Amino acid sequence: MEQVLASRSVSITELKRSPSAVLEQAGSEPVAVLNHNRPAAYLLSPQVYEAMLERLNADLRQSIQEGIDSGPAIPADALFAELSARYTDAKPRTKSKSSGKRAA
């Protein structure tokens, strides 16, 4: 069974029957919407959703800045040339079908 990541849950049927009541009871808490006892969706208040997006954006900005601070950039053409040289020079090992031993 999948983990439900909310302290409140509601069935899809109950949500269809009375969406306003579900939202009112939830307040600012997330609500797991269950379909056959499995999470199908999560309802979040606008404030929680906005805070979540702000946190994701802050983490993304921090990761980008860490990448910038990590050192000089490598031009894409140079990187692709290095990768191409590295992997086109490699010779794959082959097995001899007749003896089952590796070819020298």
Image (spheres, helix red, strand yellow):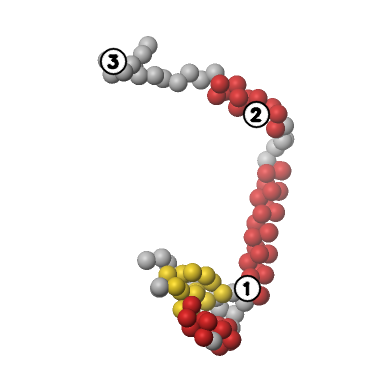
Q: Position of residue 99 (x, y in %)?
A: 27, 15
**Residue at 68%, 59% in the rendered image:** 57
Residue pointed to by mark 1 = 48
Residue pointed to by mark 3 = 98
91 or 82: nearer the viewer: 91
Residue 38 in sight in this render: yes
Q: Which amino acid does label 1 sit on?
A: Val
CA separation, marks 1 and 2?
Answer: 42 Å
| Residue 2 vertical placement versus 63 (above, below) | below
Q: Which amino acid does label 2 sit on?
A: Phe
Residue 100 falls in which quadrant of the image?
A: top left
| Residue 72 vertical placement versus 15 (above, below) | above
In terms of sequence position, does the residue under pointer 1 or pointer 3 come before the other?
1
Q: Which quarter of the rendering shows the C terminus?
A: top left
Mark sitting on residue 80: 2
**Residue at 39%, 19% in the rendered image:** 94
CA separation, marks 3 and 2?
Answer: 39 Å
Name the residue furthest top.
104
Check disc 1 and report its element: helix, strand or loop. helix
**Residue at 70%, 37% in the rendered image:** 71
